[in-house]
Amino acid sequence: MSKSSPVKRPEKRQEPASLFEVEIETGNRSDGVPVSHPVKVDSKRKVPLRSFVIVQRRKRIRQRRRLLALTGLISAIILTIWSLAFWWQPLLQGSVVARVNGQPITLEQVDRQIKVNKALSAASTGKEEALSAPSVLEQVILVEIQAQAARQAGFSVTTQDIGDEVALIIKQGNVAPGKLDERLRSNGLTYDDLKTSLADVTLVERFEERYITGGSNDPKVRAARVNQWQLGLVQKANIERLRDPNNGIAPRVGTRAPDFSLKGVDGKAIQLSALRGTRVVLYLWAPWCPACRAVVPILEEAYKSQESNGEASRFEIIAVATQSELPSVSAFVEEFGVTFPVAMDLQNYVTDLYQVGPIPTSYFIDKDGMIRAVQIGQMDASTLQQRLGAAR
């Protein structure tokens, strides 16, 4: 009897899962968002499940939109703050009249310095001496340049140092503290305002004493070293004069040169406006200044040689000696054989009028009395001719 072969039972046919069911189970959804727990779903109920997925997708889109809107709002706020800080500084820091290497100087600072000067002079001499706002602005700019250099060198002063400076000024000026306090109040100031005004001045003076003057006791040597230091700083500094603090005419390129009259070393009057119709080099200098001494021979040679160059090349020179005494200026004129006019600015009138910081400083004035170029520091013969050409 042969063995009967086993009867093969038909395999039970398995219905393939719907595409939608596979997607849910494997997480291979079209939007790329995985499902943490696979879910068995009856393929007959496709419509409700599709609706659920669509709702979730729309919800995520709304969340993304809200996040983008919030990000945009934060960016707008940051941009507004940045704009206020860097472009609208006058609204935040007062009326900015100048910047020194990006550091703003406000009209309030200039006004406070003017009032401090008036209070100190009145308490010392009984007479208020007020410099012009443009002149005081130049002083503040120069102090700021030096103070920045001192701070960059790691130098600083204490509150006690500033207090000592105030006490020294009171002592040197023979000022009674009560009288100074009265003068400060009459100008709307306090002792704190005075100390604030003198903070950078104290910093600069202490720095110069320790590192610039080299311990020399000779006033001329000390002045020359300080001037040379100032000159180097000014030439490298980024100085932005945004507007004149008086809203008037400032001695800048393109404005009229302020007129003045001084006595020369020979005692005769020298007046700028009397030279109208001729180009003028207004040269501010001092005999103790090394850079000034280097420029004088160049000016003298050009002044003498113009006679052979024709009428078109004609110009005059007024050399204004500042921070100097007549004997030293006269000796200098004789030593160098200077033939152009040299005026004595004993009270620093022209120095303040033209807002001069370091010397030498040269103003090149055209035939109509307009400033056409300014040279701070030394210049060679070619630079002199170039500046004169700008004043035609």
Image (cartoon, helix red, strand yellow):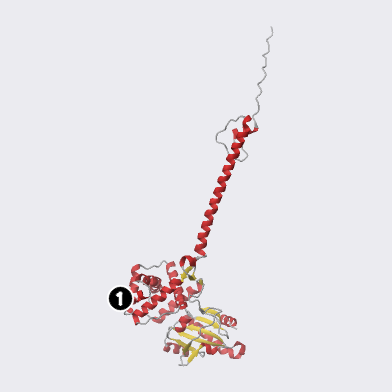
Q: Nearer the viewer, residue 219 or 392?
A: 392
Task: Report which quarter residue 277 is drawn in.
Answer: bottom right
Viewer-closest of 350 and 204? 350
Residue at position x 49%, y 67% from top?
Answer: 90
Q: Quadrant of residue 39?
A: top right
Position of residue 218 in the picture relative to residue 355 (left or right): left
Q: Residue furthest right?
A: 2
Q: Answer above or below: position of 158 versus 222.
A: above
Q: Residue furthest top?
A: 1
Q: Can I make out residue 309 in this image?
A: no
In the rendering, at what x and y percent does residue 317 appear? Answer: 53, 87
Instruction: Residue 40: give x, y in percent of width and height.
Output: 58, 30
Q: Which quarter of the rendering shows the C terminus? A: bottom right
Relative to 359, residue 58 above or below: above
The amino acid marked with disc number 1 is Gly
Image height of 40 relative to 329, above or below: above
Say left or right for 246 vs 124. Answer: right
Exactly how many numbered labels are in the figure? 1
Residue 198 at least partly seen: yes
Rate crowding at label 1 as few (under 14), some (14 to 19) or many (20 or more) other CA atoms within 10 Å.
few
The residue beneath circle 1 is 178
Q: Secondary structure at mark 1?
A: helix
